[in-house]
Amino acid sequence: MPCSVRYRKRRVGETALTAPPAARSIMNRIVEKLLAIERRCFPTPLDEGFRSLFAEVLDLVEHYQRELVARSGYTVSCAPGCTDCCCHWVEDVNSFEAEIIADYLRTTMPGRIDAVLQKCSADCREIERLEKLVAMKLQEQRIAPGNPAVDTVDLLLAVFYRIRRPCPLLGDDGRCSIYEVRPLTCRIYVSFSDPLRCNPEYIDSSVVPTCLIDLSESANRVLDALHFSYLRFDGDTGLRSLMVKYLSDDQT
Ligand code: SF4
């Protein structure tokens, strides 16, 4: 499937937050830590040195988000057990995050691996089916592939969200089963609206303020460099696709 984009898109209803000076200084520390990881050239993201520096990055990301939201006038409405956004096709996961998540699953819940693999594979087949369906519908409407007026990736992701297939890593209790190692894509997505409005039926609504509290361009540049330096598999960077590859791999 085509979701191999390495950038994050604003969608309808998204709100841009401006970083105050305190948040900018935290972001500078995030970039410094990421550069430190890059300089150390750890042989694998499972190296203790990598993990501990990256854990510091994640702590700083939380700090940065708190600082940004505190001065925004908005209130984050996300809470444990609210699972709507976990029905998204989680894109833009970094190779090193996938490696760490697969290792976490193997270490903490080996009995769930087969079930996670099966669900991820089924979801990958489903998004491929939807991709063909979307292409067919566009063809019926005589919309040529590559037409700049239609973002086919966004369209496909919206269709997938509407069919409500929860992330295979969502626990039966409605909580993320890998919360401490969840990818940055999940961490940066927050809602400021009534949780009822997070229902997929509102995906195109401009009255639902959601926000990607994304990192700075400099931070994303280093994350991209790290992603490519630890990349072991070609293809898209969806969480489900990566889990199929990393969990089926004997080397991990
Ligand atoms: S990884 Fe966790 S937070 Fe992210 S979509 Fe899956 S269950 Fe939700």
Image: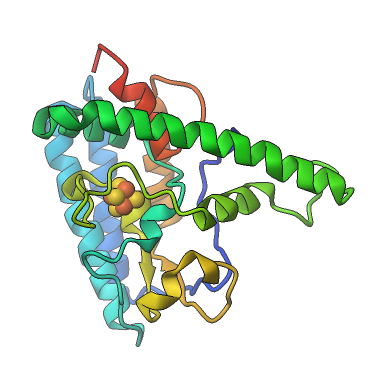
Q: Quadrant of the N terminus?
A: top right
Judge from the rendering whether residue 247 lies leftward or rightward of residue 109; answer left or right.
right
Query: Image quarter for residue 11?
Result: bottom right
Position of 41 relative to 170 (above/below) = above
**Number of marks drawn:** 0
Residue 19 position in % (x across, y down): 37, 73
The residue drawn where x is 24% and y is 72% is 66
Position of 128 relative to 74 (above/below) = above
Residue 145 position in % (x across, y down): 80, 41
Q: Nearer the viewer, residue 152 or 122?
A: 122
The residue drawn where x is 50% and y is 55% is 161
Task: Report the residue that reaches farthest toward the top.
Answer: 250
Q: How is the image coloured?
A: rainbow
Residue 182 position in % (x across, y down): 26, 47
The residue drawn where x is 53% and y is 71% is 202
Residue 208 seen from this side: yes
Residue 45 seen from this side: no
